[in-house]
Amino acid sequence: MKSNLIDKKTILLVDDHTLFRKGLRVLLKESPIFVVVGEAGTVCEASKKAHELKPDLVLMDIALPDRSGIEGARIILSQVPSVKVVVISMYSKLDFVIKALQAGGVGYLVKDTTPDMLLEALTTVIRGHYYFDHTILDEIVQFLLEHGQEEKSISDEKYERLTPREQEIMRLVAQGLSTKQIASKLFISPKTVENHRTKIMEKLQLDNLISLVKYAAKLGIIDIQS
Amino acid sequence: MVFCLHPTSLDTLGLTNTINNLCKNLYKIHRLRIDFKAAGMDSLNLNFDVKIAIYRLVQEGLNNIVKHSEATQALVRLVYSYPNIILRIEDNGKGFDVDQLTKTVTKKGCMGIWSMKERVALLNGEMTIRSVEQIGTNIHIQIPYYEK
């Protein structure tokens, strides 16, 4: 079975509307280049399937029931860094496009796109290029003209990698709570807190408690004056 | 500050970019240097009401600095640390007596602080003000926010 697919690029479809996924599947069935290998209706499901199937491409909706597709893209890319994520959304909003790019996405399509444009987008990204829906190109150009000279990012990218639980534990650690105190406050075991702490330090590339406290103060999570 | 009654860029550019633009505009107009940083906000799917409320809080906080503080520098931090959105607005201005201001807030105007407090209360949040004369003012706002 694998031999039939060997030259085709594999796609995971992520959208909570079954009918939309089925429609895409029918459309891509005719393609000599792509083959749909899996479908998911939530970010959680998509993350499991991406890990299991290691697809070449993920076509990802934004409005998903458990988490946003933007966050989904970030999670999947941390598991399968080689995957190309194309976001497909109802909305042609520039902040979604920016967020999709910041999350590691390489393409952005609006759902009322034509089948030909969808195939063009998939072919473009698989060749290693970015693709943006034509309806949002004008806005992107305008944005670049206005903001192209900006020297520094206002968002802290390392912090964006933390899960909500890790954010919470990071704050409590920075506030000076011990592992035992955090465990009791969050109703989890001290071992789990320790595991989270290790992951937090890895993700933030910090190596001791003092650097964590300084980092939290710099971001404004804690106030060292109080 | 009547301009920007409805910052449409909240829709197109998002909250952090719109606040960044506001900071740049205040520097252009009032030469107030504002160090703005955000963290953890990009992965949130904030609804428009929350976005506009946070934008207004920053706008009002910075307007107060421009109008009353004589500060030359300000700092704005907007961070999501589950389960709260944390907003800090600080300045190096002349400071004020917080207790005195709290007493006069409803009698003598001081609408900026009053409306900030109201806005925070509507979001079930908490706002604390710490100010030291000739050192500056620090406003800390915490708003509970859970993603669906």
Image: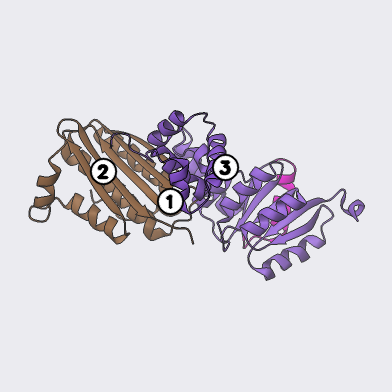
Q: Residues within 10 Å of mark 3 (few under 14, many from 20)?
A: few
Q: Which residue is mark 3?
A: A195
Q: Amino acid at mark 3?
A: Asn
Give the number of the mark in front: 2 or 3.
3
Q: Amino acid at mark 2?
A: Ile
Please identify the quarter of the rendering in which residue A41 is found: bottom right
The letter of the purple chain is A
Q: Is residue A151 visible?
A: no
Q: Which residues are magenta?
A: A111-128
| Residue positioned most to the bottom | A19
Q: Is residue B132 visible?
A: yes
Apparent colour of chain B: brown
Name the residue located 68 percent from the left edge and 41 percent from the top edge: A81
Q: Position of residue B88 (x, y in %)?
A: 32, 42
The residue nearer to you, when weighing B130 against B120, is: B130
Q: Position of residue A35 (x, y in %)?
A: 80, 56
Q: Chain of mark 3?
A: A
Give the CA separation, mark 1 to mark 3: 16 Å
Q: Chain of mark 1?
A: A
Residue A178 magenta-highlighted: no
Give the CA separation, mark 2 to mark 3: 34 Å
- Placement of A116 over or under A123, stated as above or below: below
Main SS, magenta residues:
helix
Q: Which residue is mark 1?
A: A185
Q: Which residue is mark 2?
A: B139
Give the CA separation, mark 2 to mark 1: 27 Å
Q: Secondary structure at mark 1?
A: helix
